[in-house]
Amino acid sequence: VNDIAPFLSKAYVRATAQWDVDLVKESAALAAPSSLLHGPRSWLVRGDLHLLWARWFAEGVADPERFVDEDNPFPLVLEQVLQHMPNVLPEHTHPERGELADAIAQLIVAESSRRRGSPGRRAWTRLEKEELWDASGSAPRCWICGYRFTDPARDRFLGKGGEADASPTWVDFLRPQGVHANELRIEIDHVGSLGAGGDEEALRLACGWCNRHKSDRGLTYDTRGVMKWFDHPDLGRVGVPHPFWVVRALAMHGQCDELSGCGNSIRDSEMTVAPRRMQGAPNPVNLQVVCVDHDPLVGKRLVLREEYLDRLSRRR
Ligand SMILES: [Zn+2]
Ligand SMILES: [Zn+2]
C-alpha cells in the first residue's frame, strides 16, 4: 500500500501554510508511514524525536532547574509530579498514577543533580591535558570525525608554544572544518553518558569544528531553519548540511556506511558525510557517513577555502 502520497499531501505543506491551524491539525492526525524513514540515519532521526518528546514531557511536568539547589529534592519533585498526574492519566487508578509519578520524579531528580554537578566551563590544567593526551593513543584523532591532530596543534594544546594551524587552502564543502580560526585545534569534549549506571562522564579529544558545533545542542531537531547552499564549480548549487547534523551523524556512528562493509573507523580514519542522493537536500534522512576510500564525491569534495566563502548563500 502506498501510504506515503496521502501523508505528503497533508504534511508537506508550504511554509506559509504551517500557520494554518486546520492544516496542522489534519497533519497531526496522520500516522507517519514507516517507509518514510529509511537508510542509515533512520534510527537516529526517529530516536532523537522520541528523546525530545520524552524530555519535553518529563520536564514539562517538573522543571529540573527548580530543584538544582535542593539537597534532597525527591519528595518535593514527587509531590509536584503527583499533582499533575490526573491531567496525564485521567482514566487510571491511583496506584498506576503513583507508579508513573515515581518514575518521572526519579528522572527529574537525576537530571537536576546532573545540572548541579556540571562543572561548567573552566580551564583545564596542563597536567589534565597531558594525561588525556597520553591516554589517547599514539596518533590521537578527533573522537567525532577522526581528524588526526597535527604536531603543532599538540604542542599548543600541551602549552608548549608553537604556531596556530594556518587556514587550510582546501576545505570539505560538506564538513567545512578550517574555514574559521581554531577549527583545527585540539579541545576537550565532555561526553556525558547515560548508561544503565547513570551519571558516568568521559573526557575526549575533539577538533575545534566538531566541538563547537556539538556543544550547544543535543538532538537532531535542535537546529534553526537556516539552510546554506554552495555554488560548486562542477556540481552546481548544492546544499551544505547543518554542521550539527554532520557532528551528530559522525559521533553516533563512528564508521563508514559503505554497504559492502568497510573496516575503517574514526579510530584510524577521518570520516565525513555525503548525501545519499546528490539531487536531494543534505538533511538527516539523506546523509551517509563515508570514509576516504568510499567517498562518492572524490575529486569534488575539496574546494578552495576562499571560493567556498565566496560562493555560499543562505535562505531561511
Ligand atoms: Zn572533528
Ligand atoms: Zn569506507
Image: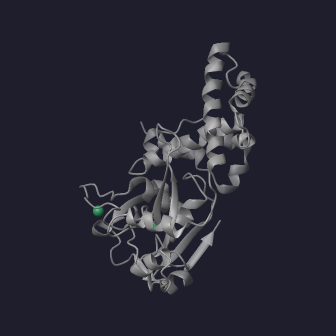
Name the quarter showing ligand 1: bottom left
Instruction: Give me the residue at 62% from left, 51% from top.
Output: 118
Quarter of the rendering containing residue 180: bottom right
Location of residue 199 with respect to 270 vertically, above or below: above
Relative vertical location of residue 312 with respect to residue 115 in this rendering, above or below:
below
Residue 134 pos. (x, y %): 38, 66
Count of numbered circles on the image: 0
Q: Quadrant of the N terminus?
A: top left
Residue 83 is left or right of residue 223, and the answer is: right
The vertical placement of 56 against 133, above or below, is: above
Q: Is residue 69 visible?
A: yes
**Where residue 289 sits in the image (x, y, percent)?**
38, 60
Residue at x 28%, y 61% (from the top left corner) = 264
Q: Residue furthest front?
A: 127
Q: Is residue 152 above or below residue 84?
A: below
Q: Quadrant of residue 303?
A: bottom left
Colour option used: one colour
Question: Residue 151 vs residue 191: left or right?
Answer: left
Question: In this rendering, does residue 276 appear at all?
Answer: no
Query: Which residue is more in the foreground, 121 or 243?
Result: 121
- Viewer-side residue, 136 vs 221: 136
Q: Position of residue 8 (x, y in %)?
A: 54, 46
- Provide residue 250's location: percent of width, then percent of height: 43, 59
Instruction: Place residue 304 in its image quadrant.
Output: bottom left
Foreground pick, 271 / 160: 160
Left or right of residue 293: residue 53: right
Residue under the point 59% across and 45% down? 11
Quadrant including the C terminus: bottom right
